[in-house]
Image (tube, grey):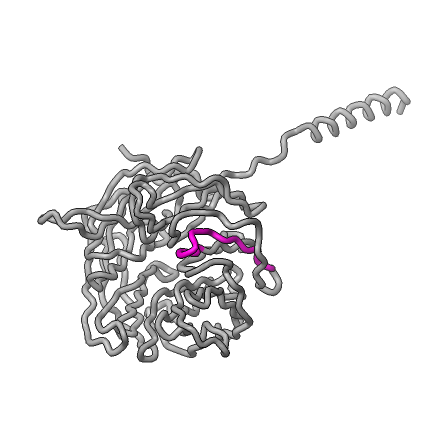
Amino acid sequence: MSQHYFLVLALLLATMHRATLAADPPAIKPSFLYVATYSPRQGEGLFVAPWNPQRGEVGALRATGGLQTTATLVVHPRGGRLYATTLLPDAKGQPGGAIAAFSIDPRNGDLKEIDRRASGGTGPCYLAIDGDGRCLVVANCGTASVACLQLKPDGRFGDSATVIQHTGTSQNSEGKPQAHSILVAPGNRFAIAADLGLDRVFSYQLDGTLARLSANDPPFVAVPRGAGPRHVAFHPTGRWAYSVNELNNTVSTFSFESKTGVLQSTENITTLPDDFRGESYAAEIQVHPTGRFLYASNRGHDSLAKYAVDPPTGQLRRVGHTLTGGKFPRHFTIDPAGQFLIVANQKSDQLVLFQIDPDSGDLKHHGMPVAIPQPVCVKILDPLKLQDQVSPVP
């Protein structure tokens, strides 16, 4: 080949290399952080901020959605919709529990209310959606009831619903039934509800299409008397479930049979250091996406307890505690990639970020605290699910 050929080839390769260098880097998919608050100001019940999942950075927070004093929220599994607790006057004009449905603007994360429905009781405090987006389940703390509400393809509420009232005699300090959480188990066939007052974790059969809940057999598993089960989390394998118990500051481990929905208690382990003697109330529980670690929050000790999960058995080994850098860590979330953990410190009006060590699960303070009034629930919208995959609202 001639020298002229090699010269032309070299010039062509150099041009291609310069074009590659000049090309814009891959765009980071937009993601948003949503926070529910107990702020008494009208319109400050929900906040949104840009979230940078690569750097673990929270952008400027702003109020959205127009609600006040919102206890909890949940994002639709296919993106595009968000649901939050609120109030809805009953037939006599008295405030009752309700769920508001919002569409999410994919450009800036802003919320626009598209529907509102009674929650089936008072004091709704926990929301979850089945993996297919067919129904929403809610725990009503005030009336000790759980409910299942049908969801339409566009994210609004359908006509079908089930409401189940918890009854029984409570022998712990709460003195009465208190449904505190409900979530859909992996596989979408069962819903698991924690009743703090009855010291029971209930299992319900679930038909998401009809929004139907019915008692499983057996209907519940008991935790130690006085434990006060608050929230439940599942291991990514679906083989184990964990209950954080508010009143005696423990975590209960259960095996879970996915075909029958039966829970069996296997162990109970404290959330507090052995030498702690003050007043504290366990609050939130989450399993790391890898399934290797579990975290639980302590309100009073103001810490996150960390546990290592034994792969063959799901049993927990207490590893240590990390102070949350604020007061009363009511809730926390782990980002979908498992790199960051964000704590909502209710009584110090702040979010605090931690970076998660992928090998040890240890938490390291990351960045500066983010000021926000009385945060009580924080969720991240996965950027991979931001596209509006639910049907548009007519």
Above or below 316: residue 235? above
- Residue at image point 31% right, 67% down: 194
**Quadrant where the image shows the C terminus:** top left
The stretch in magenta equals: 344-357
Comparing 200 with 239, the one in front is 200
Q: Is residue 111 visible?
A: yes
Q: Where is residue 7, by image quadrant? A: top right
Residue farthest right in this picture: 3
Q: Main secondary structure of the magenta part?
A: strand
Q: Is residue 155 visible?
A: no
**Quadrant where the image shows the N terminus:** top right
- Residue at image point 38% right, 36% down: 110
- Residue at image point 20% right, 56% down: 122
Comparing 338 with 71, the one in front is 71
Comparing 306 with 132, the one in front is 306
In the picture, measured across the screen, residue 281 lies left or right of residue 363, that is left
Above or below 109: residue 244? below
Residue 364 on image: x %, y %: 59, 58
Residue 303 on image: x %, y %: 48, 65
